[in-house]
Image: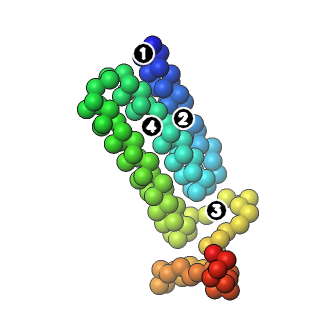
Amino acid sequence: MTEMLTGILLVVGAAFMLIAALGVWRMPDLLTRMHATTKAGVLGAGLMLAGVAIFFAEVNVLVRALAVIIFVMLTAPVAAHVIGRAGYFVGVPLWEHTLKDELKGRYDGKTHTLASPPEAAERPKDEG
């Protein structure tokens, strides 16, 4: 039973990692590629580590696997955000069918500052 559960977790995790790789290959721009790799990559790595932890069934392997899963879950979205933001500010082009560019006109390339959206200044504080 343990081997079957381990096999299922490893295969499903590998499938999510394959989906992440296909996302890098098929998505049109940096931001959508990073979205695909972050979501599917974290889930795939987590499932594969869970399979490894179940297979070995030792406390030290379980603790290490959980630590790695938590570390990846905490750092992958932050790293994707920072890389995406840097790519935007450097001038990596967005996909031509992008509907909305929230940062357009708010970033000053000379001072490297980002202005607040104009709606935030007009909104009363009790509305959020």
- The structure residue drawn at horizontal position 53% and vertical position 28%, both measured from the top left corner, is 12
- Mark toward the start of the polypeptide (4 vs 1): 1
Q: Mark 1 points at which residue?
A: 3
- Mark toward the start of the polypeptide (1 vs 3): 1
- The structure residue drawn at horizontal position 67% and vertical position 77%, both measured from the top left corner, is 127
Label 4: element kind: helix
Label 3: element kind: loop
Which percent across, then down, holds residue 123? 68, 83
Which percent across, then down, holds residue 71? 37, 48
Residue 54 lies, with reference to residue 109, above or below; the image says above
Residue 16's label in the rendered image is 2
- Calculate the distance from the C-alpha at mark 4 to the C-alpha at mark 1: 18 Å
- The structure residue drawn at horizontal position 71% and vertical position 66%, both measured from the top left corner, is 100
Amino acid type, callout 2: Phe
Marks 4, 3: nearer the viewer: 4
Amino acid type, callout 1: Glu
- Calculate the distance from the C-alpha at mark 4 to the C-alpha at mark 3: 30 Å
64 and 98: which is toward the camera: 64
Which percent across, then down, holds residue 8? 50, 22
Q: Is residue 105 visible?
A: no
The number of callouts visible is 4
Marks 3, 2: nearer the viewer: 2
Amino acid type, callout 3: Leu
- Mark toward the start of the polypeptide (3 vs 2): 2
- Calculate the distance from the C-alpha at mark 1 to the C-alpha at mark 3: 45 Å
